[in-house]
Image (tube, rainbow, N blue to C red):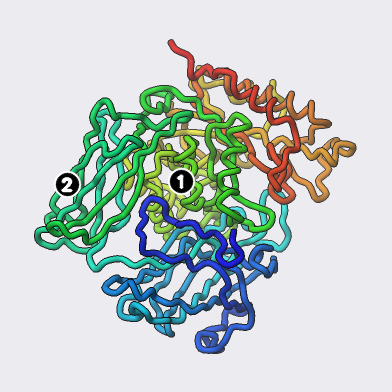
């Protein structure tokens, strides 16, 4: 992080143009506790403070560090359109703003967006010309009450249990891009392992006679293959790039080969637009209870990653911090992660692609409980579907993502009436399947499996005694999957033989500084699952016992251990919250390096 521009790297690594400017840095700022700023004239008057974007005002790195509730916040800065962008349309991009954002340019409203995890764009054509300086004002509303996709953000003041400090307003990069009048949108790159090729769908802002799209795939030796298609017949021209057999190189853990992909819009020999991207050639398939990667069983040794940092909350403090979290996970023997209760920034997925790290794309759906009647108490809104579609569209082309999971731990009882949760769960499942036919979809992790035909089934089990744990999760060979209930009531449709994994387990509560008092379930300002282990040896014995029960089950395709790091008071990580070591990581790795029964031949 430089002093002038924090997080200076390009925020969208799969769609890169040369004409872009990072707008992170010092912005004017003001709290609006009554959400009355528009009526009080904050759109026209000076704001009283400053903030360091892209860090949320609750974080230390923002320069503010106010962790109270903030109903609304305001931002402002001047932006100069480069003089060299004549003929280009200036696009103002926000990678993520929590939660409801409105943007004005010179007092003119240019975009509204709901949802704290997904990007949006304002086209400034007609309002900002090359060489001109304009004033950008942003209001972000983040109400304390009401159903809202919040992830792990607490709706009460203090951090408690597995709920953490809130994030309000801009928390990912803001940037400006110059694009041509007829421009390439976000391409959809679909690997076809069976055919040894890529299918590349290229949305365009217009289809003009005689124009063409060229897709060129390169590796370290140079150009591998090219396809060129007409751009004036189809709204999103589709190229098929066939790779020579000798240049086919699959993407997989341990060998995460990536191809560079250049996409060019042409009119004759004139280049109208060009974006740089990349792709990995890999497949995901299902055979009975097996999830296969490139046709082979790869046991998914996943860890729960919540993506929080002490000084910056949901925003990574630096590019290096994103890389380090993946490297720490790999060092502990994990080969991937559930990206939990948060849509992670694209730069994380870029490094997962680059390092061969398997991830499940998820949504931060918590924040909907307790809003309806007892039988219909979870109230996800229609915006859950829109936000999730934005996330899937953003991340479709990342090879590291091997599955989707829109919901987590929805625990509403099943009964004879269709509820709002039923409708939204099914809508999110069907929308995901419609947008992506190449990856499995898990309707809801852990609890209310309300879609009979969900591709994957799972459960969460925090039993701490390894022998009891093995009994509870060991029934797959008999067709008996461990199933979560709530208050003894059924919350899921029956298991139908899908691929199965325990997608949360462990959460072993261990804090070396509290070893002397680590008896029973005394909570004070520390939190974890079950009884704290007495010492580090107790941790390793419990971790090995729980993990071996899952590695030894040939019917299970993976697991997800809770969790990578401590997060505030939740002290059940492999590493401390500051990413320093708190136990012998080599012993954790040694347990996981044992071959899983799922991966054995025969």
The answer, for residue 389, to whether it is visible in the render is yes
Count neighbours of disc 1 (C-alpha within 10 A) and say few if under 14, some if 14 to 19, many if 20 or more: some
580 or 449: nearer the viewer = 580
Q: Is residue 134 left or right of residue 501?
A: left
Q: Which residue is mark 2?
A: 228
Q: Position of residue 513 (x, y in %)?
A: 84, 41
Q: Secondary structure at mark 1?
A: helix
Choose between 26 and 544: the one closer to the eye: 26
The N terminus sits in image quarter = bottom right
The image shows residue 354, relative to residue 44, as above or below, that is above
Mark closest to the chain's N terminus, 2 or 1: 2
Q: Is residue 222 left or right of residue 409?
A: left
- x and y, in percent, of residue 487 in the image: 64, 41
> Residue pushed farthest top?
602
What residue is rendered at 59% in x and 25% in y?
473
Q: Where residue 345 sits: x, y (%)? A: 50, 53
Q: Position of residue 375 (x, y in %)?
A: 54, 52
* The one of 251 and 344 positioned closer to us in this rendering: 251
Q: Which of 98 and 17 lies nearest the eye of the viewer?
A: 17
Residue for point 67% across, 49% down: 162
Tell me which residue sits at (69%, 63%) in the image: 60
Q: Which mark is residue 69?
A: none
Q: Find numbered disc 2 in the image and state the secondary structure of the residue it sits on.
A: strand
Residue, disc 1: 350
Give the side of residue 230 with respect to residue 591, left or right.
left
Disc 2 crowd, CA 10 A, few/some/many (<14, 14-19, 20+): some
For the point 57% across and 62% down, the residue is 6
């Amino acid at each position: 992080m430089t002093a002038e521009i924090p997080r200076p790297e390009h925020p969208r690594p799969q769609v890169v143009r040369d004409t872009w400017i990072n707008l992170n840095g010092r912005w004017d700022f003001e709290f609006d506790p009554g959400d009355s700023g528009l009526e009080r004239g904050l759109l026209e008057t000076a704001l009283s403070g400053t903030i360091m974007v892209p860090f949320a005002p609750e974080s230390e790195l923002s320069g503010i560090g106010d962790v109270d509730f903030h109903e609304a916040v305001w931002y402002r800065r001047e932006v100069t359109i480069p003089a060299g962008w004549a003929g280009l349309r200036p696009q103002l991009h926000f990678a993520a703003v929590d939660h409801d954002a409105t943007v004005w340019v010179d007092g003119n409203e240019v975009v509204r967006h709901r949802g704290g995890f997904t990007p949006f764009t304002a086209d400034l054509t007609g309002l900002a010309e090359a060489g001109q300086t304009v004033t950008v004002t942003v209001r972000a509303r983040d109400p304390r009450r009401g159903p809202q996709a919040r992830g792990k953000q607490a709706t009460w003041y203090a951090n408690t249990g597995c709920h953490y400090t809130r994030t309000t307003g801009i928390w990912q990069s803001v940037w400006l891009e110059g694009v041509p009048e007829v421009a390439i949108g976000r391409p959809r790159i679909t690997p076809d392992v069976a055919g040894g090729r890529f299918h590349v769908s290229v949305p365009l802002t217009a289809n003009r006679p005689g124009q063409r799209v060229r897709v060129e795939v390169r590796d370290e030796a140079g150009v591998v293959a090219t396809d060129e298609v007409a751009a004036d017949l189809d709204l999103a021209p589709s190229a098929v790039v066939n790779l020579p057999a000798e240049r086919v190189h699959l993407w997989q853990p341990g060998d995460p080969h990536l191809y560079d992909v250049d996409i060019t819009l042409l009119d004759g020999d004139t280049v109208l637009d060009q974006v740089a991207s990349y792709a990995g050639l890999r497949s995901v398939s299902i055979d009975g209870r097996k999830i296969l990667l490139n046709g082979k069983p790869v046991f998914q040794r996943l860890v729960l990653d919540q993506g929080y940092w002490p000084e910056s909350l949901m925003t990574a403090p630096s590019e290096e911090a994103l890389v380090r979290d993946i490297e720490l996970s790999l060092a502990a023997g994990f080969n991937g992660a559930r990206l939990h209760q948060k849509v992670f920034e694209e730069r994380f997925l870029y490094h997962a692609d680059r390092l061969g790290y398997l991830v499940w794309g998820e949504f931060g759906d918590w924040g909907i409980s307790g809003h309806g009647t007892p039988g219909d108490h979870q109230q996800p809104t229609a915006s859950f579907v829109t936000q999730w579609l934005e996330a899937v569209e953003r991340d479709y082309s990342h090879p590291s993502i091997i599955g989707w999971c829109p919901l987590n731990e929805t625990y509403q009882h099943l009964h004879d009436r269709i509820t709002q949760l039923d409708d939204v769960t099914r809508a999110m499942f069907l929308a995901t399947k419609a947008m992506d036919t190449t990856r499995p979809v898990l309707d809801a992790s852990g609890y209310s499996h309300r879609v009979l035909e969900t591709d994957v089934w799972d459960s969460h089990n925090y039993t701490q005694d390894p022998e009891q744990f093995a009994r509870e999760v060991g029934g797959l060979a008999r067709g008996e999957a461990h199933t979560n209930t709530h208050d003894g009531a059924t919350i899921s449709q029956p298991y139908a033989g899908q691929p199965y994994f325990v997608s949360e387990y462990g959460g072993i509560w261990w804090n070396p500084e509290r070893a002397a008092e680590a008896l029973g379930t005394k909570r004070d300002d520390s939190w974890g699952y079950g009884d704290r282990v007495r010492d580090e040896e107790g941790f390793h014995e419990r971790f090995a016992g729980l993990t071996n029960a899952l590695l030894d089950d040939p019917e299970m395709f993976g697991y997800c251990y809770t969790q990578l790091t401590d997060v505030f008071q939740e002290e059940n990580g492999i590493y401390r919250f500051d990413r320093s070591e708190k136990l012998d990581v080599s012993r954790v790795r040694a347990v996981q390096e044992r071959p899983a029964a799922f991966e054995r031949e025969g």
